[in-house]
């Protein structure tokens, strides 16, 4: 089998064996959910319900007329008991709708489009927006926006990202094995909306059974499965495009600049649910794993379920945790509490025990060049880190800091334990703020 890859990258220990073999279980309906009004890139939603309102599953509880945004829905039926700022795994704090369950699990009326092939791209795109679909790989970019490229940037090829290159996470792998048909149908819906003629599903070669299963169910000669070398960050958009199509997204550009759209396999499956079953995004599959969790699992979880409820369903913590991360260990975010909700972008919850967590003491750069060798964007992380640490953000911009995909490979290999990714994120945030202030 020919395996394709990209320049740079690293080979972290995968640790997927903890949970890889475990089928997706459904987490019982929680008694309470916290639905943040901002779970996506773009404008936050306004509340569409009031305290004491009764809501049904799938009812819109937050929306806005801003294009780059995505509505949020009730994931359980019950009563709105509060609308207030709550802890948020990405934003720190966010206005949220808190719903107390009534145990009835009543749905709003679903409006499936069984014969989606007869529908226009606009109807399908609107349904995806109404269903609140966002990228489930972690970025949470509204999918209807991605499916609306500029008129002068036609998309000829769709790539489904089934790489799941982050260590520990196995939710996409399980979706490819257990919900294969939905992944493929979602891809066909995306192709129809965009008028794209070709599609590829990129899967790392350490998931041979997923490659075989997906390949075996494809009935369209324009869709191909590509085996990718298992290397981090193989699932990053620009690396996938380069690897599979040998097309280079220009500096500060987007995939549509080279006629490509990339979606995650979980997003594709959720598009099928939204179109074929009329179900908005009220749940997602996550991986709950790490030595700090008693029984690691792959779970389908209602959006808004608290981390504490999820961990408790997995047998609880083994002991006082050293670190809890939302997402993968390379790009995920450390959390200070479990009193936070699963949001649309939550791909996993990883709990590390104390003896697994190292406090990294930074020492001076020894100019070994390792960070440069592994940077998949061919940047100079050591230079970017130094410029940012000294507040020389404009120079960092000239050195291409905005092209950094925040993969963390540079920090991962640095023998001096330089906090490169933190410096780089700081520079990006400062430059973005300066640009905003100037506009
Ligand atoms: S500079 Fe950015 S893109 Fe390059 S390795 Fe570091 S985090 Fe990744
Ligand atoms: S890997 Fe670390 S020590 Fe080596 S050049 Fe880069 S910043 Fe310096």
Image: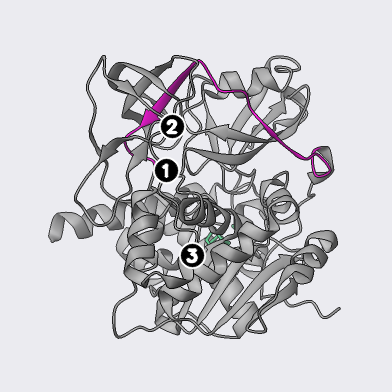
Q: Marks 1 and 2: in contact by CB < 8 Å?
A: yes
Q: Which residue is mark 3?
A: 115
Structural distance between the alpha carbons of marks 2 and 1: 8 Å
Local secondary structure at mark 2: loop
**Given this view, does label 2 or label 3 mark the residue nearer the observer?**
3
Structural distance between the alpha carbons of marks 3 and 1: 15 Å
Q: Position of residue 127 (x, y in %)?
A: 37, 56
Is residue 37 part of the magenta span, yes or no?
yes
Q: Position of residue 62 (x, y in %)?
A: 28, 36
Q: Where's ligand 1: which quadrant?
A: bottom right
Q: Which residue is mark 2?
A: 107
Q: Earlier in the sequence, mark 3 or mark 1?
A: 1
Magenta span of residues: 19-39
Density class for disc 1 (Cα within 10 Å; few <14, some 14-19, many ≥20) is few
The image's mark for residue 110 is 1
- Please say which color scheme the image uses: one colour
Q: Is residue 258 above or below residue 267?
A: below
The image's mark for residue 412 is none
Q: Is residue 303 left or right of 198 when viewed as pictured?
A: left
Q: Is residue 119 above or below residue 130?
A: below
Q: Position of residue 266 (x, y in %)?
A: 59, 53
Q: Position of residue 68 (x, y in %)?
A: 28, 56
Q: What's the residue at 48%, 63% (across, down)? A: 404
Q: Earlier in the sequence, mark 2 or mark 3?
A: 2
Q: Is residue 193 above or below residue 327?
A: below
């Amino acid at each position: 089998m020919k395996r394709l890859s990209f320049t740079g990258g690293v080979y972290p220990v995968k640790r997927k064996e903890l949970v890889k073999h475990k089928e997706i279980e459904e987490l019982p309906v929680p008694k309470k959910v916290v639905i943040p009004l901002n779970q996506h890139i773009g404008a936050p939603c306004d509340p569409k319900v009031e305290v004491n309102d009764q809501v049904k599953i799938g009812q819109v509880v937050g929306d806005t007329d801003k294009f780059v945004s995505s509505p949020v829905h009730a994931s359980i039926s019950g009563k709105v008991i509060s609308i207030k700022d709550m802890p948020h795994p990405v934003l720190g704090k966010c206005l949220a709708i808190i719903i107390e369950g009534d145990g009835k699990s009543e749905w709003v009326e679903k409006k499936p489009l069984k014969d989606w092939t007869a529908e226009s791209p606009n109807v399908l795109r609107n349904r995806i927006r109404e269903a609140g679909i966002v990228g489930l790989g972690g970025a949470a970019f509204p999918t209807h926006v991605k499916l609306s490229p500029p008129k002068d940037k036609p998309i000829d090829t769709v790539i489904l990202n089934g790489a799941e290159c982050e260590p520990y996470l196995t939710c996409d792998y399980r979706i490819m094995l257990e919900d294969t048909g939905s992944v493929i149908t979602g891809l066909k819906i995306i192709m129809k909306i965009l008028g794209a003629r070709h599609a590829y599903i990129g899967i790392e070669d350490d998931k041979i059974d997923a490659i075989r299963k997906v390949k075996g169910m494809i009935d369209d000669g324009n869709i191909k499965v590509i085996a990718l070398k298992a290397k981090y960050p193989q699932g990053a958009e620009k690396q996938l495009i380069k690897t599979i199509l040998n097309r280079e997204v220009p500096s500060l550009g987007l995939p549509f600049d080279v006629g490509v759209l990339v979606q995650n396999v979980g997003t594709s499956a959720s598009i099928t649910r939204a179109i074929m079953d009329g179900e908005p995004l009220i749940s997602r599959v996550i991986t709950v794993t790490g030595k700090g969790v008693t029984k690691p699992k792959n779970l389908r979880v209602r959006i808004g379920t608290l981390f504490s409820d999820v961990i408790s369903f997995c047998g609880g913590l083994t002991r006082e945790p050293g670190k809890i991360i939302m997402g993968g260990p390379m790009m995920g975010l450390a959390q200070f509490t479990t009193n936070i909700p699963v949001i649309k972008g939550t791909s996993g919850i990883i709990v590390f025990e104390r003896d697994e967590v190292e406090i990294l003491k930074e020492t001076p750069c020894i100019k070994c060049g390792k960070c440069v060798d592994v940077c998949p964007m061919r940047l100079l992380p050591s230079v970017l880190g130094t410029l940012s640490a000294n507040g020389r953000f404009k120079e960092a911009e000239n050195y291409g800091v905005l092209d950094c995909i925040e993969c963390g490979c540079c920090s991962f290999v640095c023998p001096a334990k330089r906090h490169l990714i933190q410096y780089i994120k700081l520079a990006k945030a400062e430059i973005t703020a300066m640009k905003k202030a100037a506009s």
